Image (cartoon, helix red, strand yellow):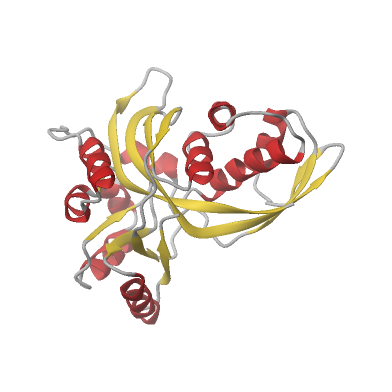
Amino acid sequence: MTVEAYAKINLTLEVLGKRPDGYHDLRSVVCPITLSDTLVLESSSFASSDTGYDDDLCHRSAAALGVGCAIHVEKNIPAGGGLGGGSADAAAVLLALNRMYGLGYDVESLSEKGAEVGSDVPALVLANAHSSPVIMEGRGERVRPISPIKLNFVLVNPRVHSSTKEIFSRWTPSSHSLNVTEIAEKALLTRDINLLASVISNDLKNAAVSLHSEIGEALEALKSENVLAASMTGSGSTVFALVSSSEEAIFIAERMKKRGYLAFSVSSL
């Protein structure tokens, strides 16, 4: 079986505080996008994967379902870029193995299984299954889908690897006078793109820029293109811009490539 594992961007990412278990309480709109890894899965008596990662989330997904599978991954999603590549692969494995072996899990149950694998996996199970943005809360285990919507983006990766652990260690608490995730959800439901653009944000941006100045430079480069909004996804290093059309996304992505960035024109699923 061959499947696509779709990346994500965080249209909002609010860090609400540190939990007693060491994780952070988050609130986010997670949006699946058309950038993807390609996975080839074959039945096997045991689980194996060729990702080469020490913490192989694909292998962990197969183990969570208790089935064997040989998994080959063709990587297109930049690693360490805040795009959820490893988690997207894990979510795709959960969905694919459920079909391959006729396990009978519904999407919500698979999402719960995903929480055993990694914090971003539950949201990406729902996002990939419903082809829609998802509200994510807690450490990532509380998720619910929003209605699908067509949005166009430019992704710019400054070719640095951002460590989630390091970024969170530099995060400092700030007040949340507005629930930007709630406002973003309303904007998505009402198709109000201007309202959405006004609340696109990421509480980890300052921490990431303090560690990697290249992220800030890439963000300023995007903002100079008069985009609707620009922000960072996840803990970096990829930044993105919301634009008004696919043609504009292609045009700006090409301009970013000429400036030496790894850039993609994408849309929401």
**Residue at image location 38% in from the left, 17% down from the top:** 20
**Residue at image location 53% in from the left, 42% down from the top:** 129
Q: In x, y percent, where is residue 185?
A: 27, 40
Residue farthest along the bottom direction in this orientation = 258
Q: In x, y percent, where is residue 262?
A: 44, 70
Can residue 24 be seen here? The reply is yes
Q: In x, y percent, where is residue 52?
A: 69, 51
Q: In x, y percent, where is residue 213?
A: 30, 60
Residue 60 location, quadrant: top right
**Residue at image location 32% in from the left, 50% down from the top:** 208
Residue farthest along the top direction in this orientation = 20
Residue farthest along the left direction in this orientation = 177
**Which of the pair 127/240 is nearer the observer?**
127
Quadrant (top left, top right, bottom left, bottom right) of the C terminus: bottom left
| Up-down relation of residue 7 to residue 129 (above or below) | below
Residue 74 location, quadrant: bottom right
Say left or right for 44 vs 118.
right
**Residue at image location 46% in from the left, 27% down from the top:** 141
Say left or right for 55 vs 163.
right
